[in-house]
Amino acid sequence: MHKEVFSKQLDFAALLHDVSNIFEGASLIVNQIIDGAYGCSLEEIRPFLIALQQTNKRGVDLIESRRVNEEVGVVNVTQFDVLVFLQKNYSQFKPIAQYYSLNLHYQTQASYKHGTQVRGDSISIDRMLCNLVTNAIKYTKKGDIFLRLLNQGDDLIIEIEDTGCGIATEQLSNIFIPFWRSPQSRLSEKPGRGMGLYIAWIVAYAHGLSIRVDSVATQGTKFTIQFPYKDDGIYGVDGRMLPKSQRLQDALPV
Ligand SMILES: Nc1ncnc2c1ncn2[C@@H]1O[C@H](COP(=O)(O)OP(=O)(O)OP(=O)(O)O)[C@@H](O)[C@H]1O
Ligand SMILES: [Mg+2]
């Protein structure tokens, strides 16, 4: 198949994947509200209604940005505070983690050496993070999940760590390949298409970020996203992002 057609199909499959994950997340929150898991009064359920509202907004924003991207052909690069951004992510995923009896923690530093301002396509960065947190929840039967924002030297680091099933060392080189799932995942009752980590990789690549995985089978997995320090004190992209076709060709770890 022609490379461009393939990359367009892959892009569309990735979009469907993320939209369907958003619907699934919203359903989980609604089901819990209906079951009375958070209480019955409006005050008790308000934080979960807000999480639901934000989850819906993510879906609308994702589709809208895709529409603009198709029609105008530009990626919307903005500057935002990643500390606030992660806090929002945390409150959206907290009820979903709770649904699976997992504890989601958000750990931050009291202060950051060069602040926490990032320039980039916030919708794509959100997709990268959501896929990593969704995986952490999906591949952890019991225990904790940590979302962290920290400095390593001058760099800004996001960590997503779980205490789940882990990934065997010999499989680690495959995980970012589209449609790859570990043999255990394929046999498990957990549905999936092997798209989440591919999406995370593409987004990291387009923003000039590095994404690393440390995992011990049966113990847990940690994904580390590194925003290299820039002279102007703002992390992320400088100007325009890499064109899509180039991104796909260069980014695939195969
Ligand atoms: N946090 C994790 N812990 C253990 N294994 C993981 C973790 N994240 C990913 N994996 C492994 O990497 C594979 C690829 O992950 P990826 O997110 O791309 O696909 P998926 O979760 O199987 O399906 P999809 O994301 O399309 O719903 C998974 O099938 C799983 O085997
Ligand atoms: Mg996944």
Image: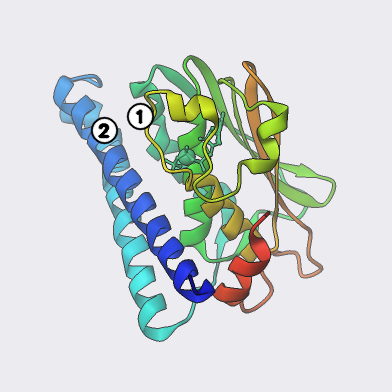
Q: Name the residue located 59 percent from the left edge and 77 percent from the top edge.
A: 243
**150 sits left or right of 61 in the view:** right
* Callout 1 secondary element: helix
Q: Is residue 40 among what the camera can see?
A: no
| Residue 52 placement: quadrant | top left
**128 sits left or right of 20 in the view:** right
**160 sits left or right of 8 in the view:** right
Q: Name the residue located 34 percent from the left edge and 44 percent from the top edge.
A: 21
Q: Is residue 98 among what the camera can see?
A: yes
Q: Position of residue 19 (x, y in %)?
A: 32, 52
The residue carrying mark 1 has its beta carbon less than 8 Å from ligand 2: no
C-beta proximity under 8 Å, tags 1 and 2: yes
Q: Position of residue 253 (x, y in %)?
A: 68, 54
Compared to 74, does 14 lie above or below? above
Q: Position of residue 205 (x, y in %)?
A: 65, 61
Residue type for callout 2: Ile
**71 sits left or right of 245 in the view:** left
Compared to 137, does 63 lie above or below? below
**3D distance between C-alphas at marks 1 and 2:** 7 Å
- Earlier residue among tags 1 and 2: 2
Residue type for callout 1: Pro
* Residue at the right extreme of this rendering: 153
| Residue 14 placement: quadrant | bottom left
Q: Which residue is mark 2?
A: 29
Q: Residues within 10 Å of mark 2 (few under 14, many from 20)?
A: many
Q: Which residue is mark 1?
A: 95
* Callout 2 secondary element: helix
